[in-house]
């Protein structure tokens, strides 16, 4: 595969732990044969998304970096929604950061706005075996705060809040309001805590986008949303592949 890349005049980079032959192949395909790549990942060529060069360049970089646990369409939804909400007042936030892949997308979309990132940066906290049968304490522990800080160092106004969320939100300025929140916490308790923390701090027309709402292996996320929406009368939009979006319709 490295020979193919050389033939296409791309500078091959040495394999890292993360960079598999598949990753290198996908990146080459995206760069040299985009129509084939989009067919492979099932994005019809007529979608304007395929023409978003900034995004696909970033996506190729994330592939190489071996970061971001989300599907291409989900990454694009994050990128697009973060851009669309830019004109509103308020800050960006992500709860569930792991090694910073999805946060990297938000950094590229947010401009100079504040972005608050919440994670233990040391793995999943205690889980509820009934609500979260496929998750356990300590998953996603192969990261750390410094690694994420280094990865996002080029971007201004990025704030890392390490520790158990929502306790870790104590150092967020009391008057901080949010226009865009990405929840990617995987488990019931954390997702419910995320909704209860961020919804009252969301500006009108701001949105919470969550990963895993439609993920069979993360039933706790849907359970948390269903419970929260029974308390809070707001519309919820479920997206392809697993995401959902809650838009705040009132002050
Ligand atoms: C799937 S990973 C996030 C992936 C990341 N958004 C990405 O796309 O690369 C889920 C993360 O949620 C974090 N998490 C879950 N509940 C938490 C809580 N209550 N406090 C802090 N971190 C939590 C875990 O530590 C883990 O890193």
Image: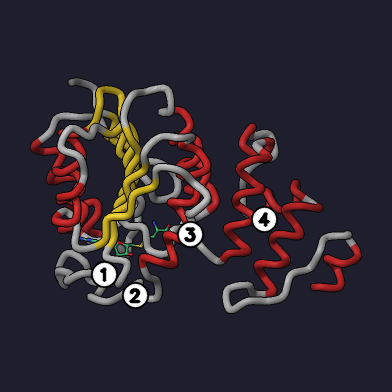
Q: Residue at x 17, y 71 (%)?
A: 126
Circle on res. 176: none
Closest to the observer, 53 or 113: 113
Residue 46 placed where, x, y %? 68, 34
Q: For label 3, count other residues whose C-alpha is less than 10 Å away and answer few (under 14), some (14-19) or many (20+).
A: many
Instruction: Determine whether the beta carbon of the residue marked 2 sits less than 8 angstroms from the nearest atom of ligand 1.
Output: yes
Circle on res. 141: 2
Q: How far apart are the alpha carbons under marks 2 and 4? A: 31 Å
- Residue 202 in view (yes/no): yes
Q: How far apart are the alpha carbons under marks 3 and 2? A: 15 Å
Mark 4 lies on a secondary structure that is helix
Closest to the observer, 40 or 89: 89
Specify which label sits upstream in the sequence, 2 or 4: 4
Q: How far apart are the alpha carbons under marks 4 and 3? A: 19 Å
Q: Are marks 1 and 2 in contact (CB under 8 Å)?
A: yes
Q: Are marks 3 and 1 in contact (CB under 8 Å)?
A: no
């Amino acid at each position: 595969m490295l020979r193919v890349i050389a033939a296409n005049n791309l500078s091959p980079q040495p394999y890292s732990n993360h960079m598999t032959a598949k990753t290198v192949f996908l990146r080459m395909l995206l760069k040299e044969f985009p129509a084939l790549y989009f067919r492979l990942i099932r994005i019809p060529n007529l979608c304007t998304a395929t023409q978003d060069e900034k995004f696909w360049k970033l996506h190729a970089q994330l592939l190489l970096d071996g970061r971001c646990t989300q599907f291409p369409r989900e990454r694009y939804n994050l990128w697009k929604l973060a851009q669309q909400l830019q004109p509103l007042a308020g800050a960006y936030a992500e709860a569930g950061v792991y090694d910073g892949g999805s946060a990297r997308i938000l950094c590229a979309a947010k401009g100079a706005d504040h972005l608050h990132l919440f994670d233990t940066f040391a793995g999943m906290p205690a889980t509820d075996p009934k609500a979260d049968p496929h998750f356990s304490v300590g998953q996603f522990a192969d990261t750390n705060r410094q690694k994420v800080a280094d990865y996002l160092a080029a971007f201004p106004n990025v704030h890392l809040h390490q520790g158990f969320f929502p306790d870790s939100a104590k150092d967020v300025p009391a008057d901080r309001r949010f226009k865009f929140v990405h929840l990617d916490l995987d488990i019931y308790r954390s997702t419910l805590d995320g909704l209860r923390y961020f919804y009252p701090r969301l500006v009108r027309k701001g949105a919470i986008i969550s990963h895993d709402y439609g993920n069979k292996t993360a039933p706790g996320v849907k359970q948390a949303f269903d419970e929260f929406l029974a308390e809070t009368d707001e519309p919820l939009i479920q997206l392809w592949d697993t995401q959902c979006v809650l838009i705040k319709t009132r002050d």
